[in-house]
Amino acid sequence: MAYSAEDVKRLRELTAAGMLDCKKALDEAEGDFDKAVEIIRVKGQKGVTKREGRATSNGLVTAKAEGDLGVMLELNCETDFVAKGERFQELADELLNHLVAVKIAELPAFLASKLASGKTVQERVDEGNATLGEKIEIKRISVLTGSPVALYLHKTSPDLPAQVGVLVQLKNAAAEAGRDIAQHIAAFAPQYVSRDQVPADLIETERRLAEETARNEGKPEASISKIVEGRVTGFVKEVSLLEQAFAKDAKKTVQQILDEAKTAVSAFNRFRVGQ
């Protein structure tokens, strides 16, 4: 059975396989379109295991926030070419909508949960892996519930989907301040909400390194203690959201912006593709 260039195009659109693979599948299927689709999917599934060890440093971050619910998901792939593709982005949307529905915060449990089709999330990801011809994986998810959630997604390049995503959970609704804080977090990447959350062992490590650095710099013994404490204080301010200088007004801290909006940050999550 003969096939046309239009058949090749349609097969590419349906399966996301390369042109050469589509031609080979149609040749093997002797022009039978449905059989060619099966051939590509079978070959794609065989390639899933081979791709397991590959790095997935590209992809996207997608998220939704409405009222007291915010969810976010990072879907990774191998190349930016696939990340730009409609099929990859449609898969991300499908998985995000499922996350909104099930509100499962633990990744293993989310991967094991079932979509409306009856397939598990992992099976759906493996299917995408097969059809797109690259290793596809969900790197991480976030679910915040119980109080208002603000959202910010950032594109690092105009031709790519969002590469940075932030969810911020507030104690009281403050839409404008919430979005501003989410943008700030995207830019300055704090690690903790407040200094109280910074692990004691991390502070002690920073104190030890600061002392070693001061001694290596030949600082006077009498001033080392003061220098060390100053550097530790600077480190804590750098990693604590509330003590950072606010991105839109460096004369104010994030804490001051929240106080003015009569709200507070309960939690936040920041995803950046590849980090």
Image: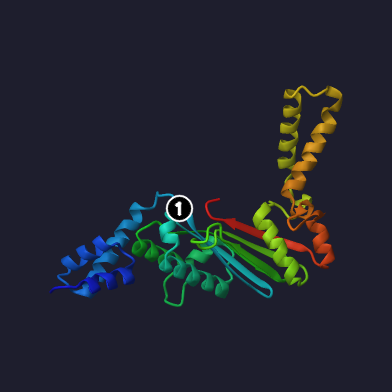
Q: Nearer the viewer, residue 62 or 7?
A: 7
**Mark 1, secondary structure of its residue:** loop
Q: Quadrant of residue 136?
A: bottom left
Q: Residue at x 36, y 62 (%)?
A: 132
Would you place residue 101 above or below residue 209 in this image?
A: below
Q: Which residue is mark 1?
A: 56
Lateral position of residue 77 relative to residue 215, left or right? left
| Residue 79 in picture, x, y percent from top left | 42, 55
Lateral position of residue 20 relative to residue 171, left or right? left
Q: Residue at x 21, y 72 (%)?
A: 35
Outermost residue toward the right? 222
Q: Residue at x 42, y 75 (%)?
A: 118
Q: Quadrant of residue 253?
A: bottom right
Q: For the residue marked with disc 1, what is the amino acid?
A: Thr
Residue 65 seen by the camera: yes
| Residue 271 in picture, x, y percent from top left | 59, 57
Lateral position of residue 233 relative to residue 4, left or right? right
